[in-house]
Image (cartoon, coloured by chain):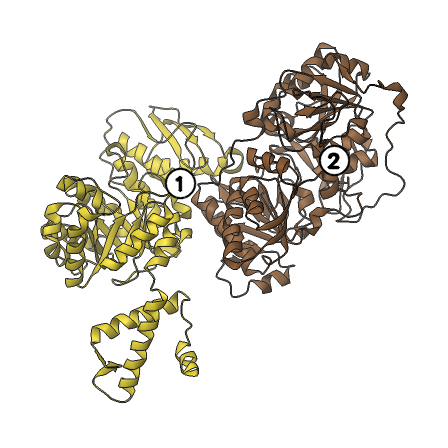
Amino acid sequence: MSTKSNIAHAGKRGDKVRSDCYIEIELKKSGGLKIDLKSKVDSMFGVSIQEQIKEMSEFFGLKNANILFEDAGALPFVIAARFELAVKKLFPGIDKDFLPEFNKKNLYKTTKDRLRRSRLYLPGNEPKFYPNAGLHKPDGIILDLEDSVSPTEKEAAQLIVRNALRSVDFYGAERMVRINQLPKGLDDLKFIIPHNVHVILIPKVESAEQINLVEEKVEELKKIFKTKNEIYFMPIIESALGVINSYEIATASIYNCALAVGLEDYTADIGVERTNEGHESIFARSMIINAAKAAKIQAIDTVFSDVSDMEGLRNSVLEAKSLGFEGKGCIHPRQIKIINETFLPNEKEIDKAKKIVLAFEEAESKGQGVVSLGSKMIDAPVVKRARRIVKLAEENNLLDENWREVNSLMV
Amino acid sequence: MKLVKNSAGRLVPEKVNNQKQIPFKGIGKFKPKGNKAKPPIKTCADYPADGNKVVKNLKEALKKAGLKDGMTISTHHHLRNGDVLTNYLFDVIKEMGVKNIRWFPTASFPCHQHLIKYLDDGTIHHIEGSMNGPLGRYTSEGKMKGVGVLRSHGGRYQSIQDGEVHIDIAVIAAPTADMFGNATGDRGKSACGLLGFALADSEYADKVIAVTDNLIEFPCYPWQIQGNYVDYVVEIDSLGDPAKIVSGTTEVTKSPDRLLIAEYVAQFLEDSGIMKNGFSFQAGAGGTNLAFAVYLKEKMKKNGVKARFIRGGSTKYLVEMLEEGLTDYILDGQTFDLEGVRSMRENPKHVNTSPFTSYNYHGKGNFASMVDAVVLGATEVDLNFNANVVTHSDGYLLHGIGGWQNCLFSKCTILAIPSFRDRIPVIVDEVTTLVGPGDLIDVIVTERGIAINPKRKDLLKAVKGSSLPIKSIKELYDEVIELCGIPKKPKVNKNKVVAVVKWVDGTLLDSVFQVDK
């Protein structure tokens, strides 16, 4: 092992730091391991922290070192990531990863067409937000390596995100990671592919070629790590060029599950202010919805950034839904409930869907090839959509499972 | 110090500060006989016929009151963390060279760390009240000369009525008073709301001194403390820092996890059927509790439900509910913000209560047990639903009991707490200090789910089919341990009791031991 310097540090320190830690390792020629532990939870976890540090030191072959450890209640997966980063700064060439045990609760899979109404962004280097994020029931959790992580924290975030994918329970949310803009984003992949990531969000996509690059790299890593689960892509389109190329992007890979729009960068790119009304982005949004639907994948809207304006959020979701979007990003857990509720079908939509489904089932039982409701003919895609609405309504307690019987009684 | 095991299985000393103690016998089991304590007979002939009891300063008043070594001095926490008077009082006592005072506050705040030097130099012998923040740390490290005694607001009233604590001199901070000693907290530059916590002291203490920074012409009406109990009136420049006495506004928490907990609590009241016309509830001023009130209000409006009364600590959120007609009354124990003070002053349906009406163990009933649901906090809850509010899991004493123990007697006691804080589990196998017996604690609401005490089969049945995440307390515990790991117990010196926790009836519920550094 070669070293650059004999002292390195990682993590966060200061009065405001919570649920995180700071580690400083100074290599010595002799004297064994000296651990200086300053922990806010010392009386409860001091012993187990000491053990964890010793175990990791042994794993990385650290024999003689002074280790300063300042702790504000970091969970073990955070301590591990911080320690590993400090070691890797000391030995840049080291080819060993200290992987926390894989939590069995994190083995669940996803499907290409699952609900993606709400996806909650979690900054990649802020692990304190992780353990409770899933409790707010977003459809998806995004561990973000891109814009929410400053350039100096990228390596730290990679390790935190990797460890979180293995050990943090996200309570059934779809497990997403937003990688960095290509080509840097390609380096992020090895930190997430072996750890049951479900969806990779690819930012600032402008061409199909970029999706192909990601797909090639993912396939390569899947072979190396013998990863079997399906991993989907959600390209995010954030520029004028990306909007123009959106259909080619949407159809670039069979693993694309959705196309998302990012309006902060897009409005900057076309040189206008972003407004709440959103007239300036109507073309981009419609184009992306159209491209996604043509490619038979989901269209997902941008985030609503005023976290205190819940009425504004609801209106924004209603508008997105009316345009054809099926989901929206969240930057605060309190936005989730409103987004999830508002994307669900309303009473009128459910009523109409019920009638269509009943008409279809009746026609089917009579062996009729043509479905009609009143004097109107109903096409197959309309039936499919109605069935999806009914299923959603049933799953979300908006419609009793036995509605057919109740319906016939009322008739 | 000889320790005995009480009926809750906790070790408590036989004697505290040389007073013999009765170990906890079980809830509602200890019923002392005989008569209540009696204040000394006074004669009006000894007081100025013109009603003017004003003396020139606090030192003079203390001298006239006969202050001497070893006396018990009481103060009250109306002024909260803005209290300047108590610190000034002990500056004067120190100056007079008096020693070994038993300080008997209704609560202490971080501002009272000023008094640590008087604990060090022997001016104060020990504290019977609450030991918050720096005073708690000081006590936990075994630096206080005597043993601290922690009582609930109701337990404090009981100890005075039982004669267990005899107050020599009560010093009452009065934001507005007249020369006769009539006093109120709802007006004046240091307005704090009400003075209910000082009621027992005014009735039972040998000598009562009212200290005001707003002396007005007789009569100060309406009064909260009656001048007929007051011996001396002292005017000073300032009782405290108004910004710290009441906050301008109290704010709902912004933490998404705490908002989630608050939302679950409100939903629990709705789904369990507790929220119905004519119901009552109590919620404190913590950020989670405020948010709970906001969510509950939405639900009440949506369902057309009106409460008969809400018990405060009042805040602008409760005042809004009163003014919008969502409750007939606020029965208030203390006011936390300026809106609460204004409402109490102006609205006859915003009623001024005291530990006597709400919490008194020797009363012929009290309000606390009549409340349909109360929402409280805790530092720890264990697998038997026992809860702790005075120490943290590291063994350090950090909070007082306040009205917490008394409120446990409501028809449905809900603890709204995070399941862990910065790796420190709040759901534990066994509480560090027992302050609330699990038999009185019905529901634990955390961000990870809701646990209902298995003894409350009625509540379990009521929420069957609800979309709430109902779990067992063991399931919550296991989830927390999986995240945080199993915490080690604090290292304490089991031979050195630094404070005791009284139950509402005056018996000893648990001991707090010296923390080994």
In the displayed image of the protein, which residue is found farthest to the bottom?
A: A366
Question: Quadrant location of residue B107?
Answer: top right
Mark 1: amino acid: Lys
Q: Residues within 10 Å of mark 2 (few under 14, many from 20)?
A: many
- Residue B475, can we see it? no
Question: Quadrant location of residue A30?
Answer: top left
Q: x%, y% of residue B481? A: 49, 48
B352 vs A192, nearest the viewer: B352
Which type of secondary structure does the marked residue at label 2 adopt? helix
Q: Nearer the viewer, mark 2 or mark 1?
A: 2
Marks 2, 1 in one chain: no
Chain of the residue on which disc 1 is drawn: A
Query: Label 1, on which residue?
Result: A128
* Chain ID, brown in image: B
Which type of secondary structure does the marked residue at label 1 adopt? helix
Determine whether, in the image, residue A23 is placed left or right of residue B125. left
B36 vs B456, nearest the viewer: B36
- Marks 1 and 2: in contact by CB < 8 Å? no
Which numbered circle lies on residue B156? 2
Q: Residue at x 57, y 22 (%)?
A: B241
